[in-house]
Image (cartoon, helix red, strand yellow):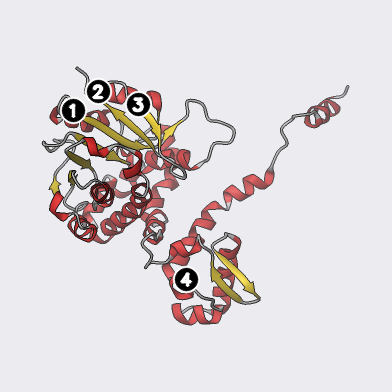
């Protein structure tokens, strides 16, 4: 059989993998899709359409833009599943598109703004450098690390806090019912930002007290969050550096979406400070996604893209169960127990008791 015939036979064999060039093209247009959604938030498209219907002309007037260009934007948003064209030239939000509105309690507008912000994306231009060096590119691009840059830019820091709060609300909707917080006296939410997650936990556990521990910038909106949730009398804020110490007094130390920001040495220091103040009956609770040991064929790309985002912007990484076990043991904890949060959450609960 000639070489060409052999290749054709292999390609046509039962179960043979068929190339999908369309998939490559779709992936390459992903950055354009993200920018389209960002522009929709920037122009306030969801707020302008609201709960009813609107035309490109009316939307254009509201955002001071050119009507034909707005029409093209609305069509693209429709193809992305964020709008629907109910009849020619008349658009309405889908349930998903409504999440881009700024007045909804479950809004993702700040999240979109942060993750499509040029500051967040510029280091991605140097992904190859990070892959070669193993170091974040952000520091070289901006002359400082990510969180120091936020500290120097208050408006960007507030935007980051808002985006993290919107992300935390998703976990806050399920976490209080997925873990027995009632067996503890005081939970310390390490790196807890504006207190969104802690407030939800305290609201569902009236006998529990809580402390949110973060930088002064991270805590900027925490008192307001606690007051709005009606738990201000049981919640307090402590400002500090978790690389230096963890506040005393807790019997549960909670860290959500913190560990993946840092490298192994830094994580061991953070968790070690928690271990130093944890009573024998206390617990460490991490809320993080975990990567499978082997990438499955149907793996959702989100966690792996997040892993690369940690590489280029922060120097952290997403981890496997084996990685988390090694971290916990290095910080003075027993091997952790892993449990999945209810769908659609991709996070897992990683609970560890102090080692004797």
Frontmost of labels 1 and 3 is 3
User: Is disc 4 placed on a helix, strand or loop?
Assistant: helix
Residue 275: which numbered mark, if any? 1
Q: Residue at x 35, y 52 (%)?
A: 169
User: Is disc 1 placed on a helix, strand or loop?
Assistant: helix
Mark nearer the N terminus (1 vs 2): 1
Looking at the image, residue 170 sits to the left or right of residue 262; the answer is right
Q: CA distance from mark 1 to mark 3?
A: 17 Å
Q: Residues within 10 Å of mark 3 (few under 14, many from 20)?
A: some
Frontmost of labels 4 and 2 is 2
Q: CA distance from mark 3 to mark 4?
A: 44 Å
- Where residue 5 sits: x, y (%)? 86, 28
Frontmost of labels 3 and 4 is 3
Q: Residues within 10 Å of mark 1 (few under 14, many from 20)?
A: many
The residue where tag 2 is placed is 333
**Looking at the image, which is closer to me, 149 or 178?**
178
Q: Residues within 10 Å of mark 2 (few under 14, many from 20)?
A: many
Q: Residues within 10 Å of mark 4 (few under 14, many from 20)?
A: many
- Where residue 355 sits: x, y (%)? 22, 19
Q: CA distance from mark 1 to mark 2?
A: 7 Å
Q: CA distance from mark 3 to mark 2?
A: 11 Å
- Where residue 75 sits: x, y (%)? 60, 68
Snapshot quadrant of residue 54: bottom right
Frontmost of labels 3 and 2 is 3
Q: Residue at x 15, y 50 (%)?
A: 234
Mark nearer the N terminus (4 vs 2): 4
Outermost residue, right side: 1
The residue where tag 3 is placed is 337
The answer to whether mark 1 and mark 2 are in CB contact below 8 A is yes
**Location of residue 330 with respect to 196 vertically, above or below:** above
The residue where tag 4 is placed is 45
């Amino acid at each position: 059989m000639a070489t060409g015939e052999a290749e054709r036979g292999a390609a046509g064999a039962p179960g043979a993998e068929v190339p999908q060039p369309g998939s490559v093209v779709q992936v390459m247009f992903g950055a354009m899709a993200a920018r389209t959604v960002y522009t929709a938030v920037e122009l306030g498209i969801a707020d302008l359409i609201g709960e009813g219907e609107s035309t490109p002309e009316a939307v254009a007037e509201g955002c001071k833009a050119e009507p034909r260009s707005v029409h093209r934007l609305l069509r693209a948003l429709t193809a992305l599943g964020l709008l629907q064209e109910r009849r020619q030239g008349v658009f309405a939000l889908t349930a998903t598109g409504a999440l881009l509105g700024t007045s909804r309690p479950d809004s993702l507008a700040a999240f979109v703004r942060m993750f499509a912000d040029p500051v967040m994306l510029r280091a991605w231009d140097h992904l190859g450098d990070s892959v070669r060096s193993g170091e974040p590119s952000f520091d070289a691009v901006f002359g400082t690390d990510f969180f120091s840059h936020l500290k120097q830019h208050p408006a960007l820091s507030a935007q980051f806090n808002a985006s993290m709060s919107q992300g935390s609300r998703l976990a806050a909707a399920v976490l209080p019912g997925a873990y027995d917080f009632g067996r503890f006296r005081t939970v310390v939410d390490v790196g807890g930002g504006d207190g969104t997650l802690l407030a939800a936990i305290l609201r569902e556990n009236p006998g529990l007290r809580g402390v949110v521990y973060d930088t002064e910038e991270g805590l900027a909106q925490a008192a307001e969050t606690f007051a709005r949730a009606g738990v201000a009398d049981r919640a307090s804020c402590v400002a500090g550096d978790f690389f230096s110490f963890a506040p005393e007094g807790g019997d549960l130390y909670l860290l959500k979406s913190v560990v993946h920001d840092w490298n192994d040495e830094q994580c061991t220091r953070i968790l070690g400070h928690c271990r130093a103040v944890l009573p024998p009956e206390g617990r460490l609770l991490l809320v993080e996604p975990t990567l499978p040991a082997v990438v499955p064929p149907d793996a959702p790309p989100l966690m792996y893209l997040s892993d690369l985002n940690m590489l280029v912007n922060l120097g952290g990484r997403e981890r496997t169960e084996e990685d988390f076990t090694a971290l916990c043991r290095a910080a003075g904890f027993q091997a952790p127990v892993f449990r999945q949060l209810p769908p659609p959450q991709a996070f897992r609960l990683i609970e560890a008791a102090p080692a004797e």
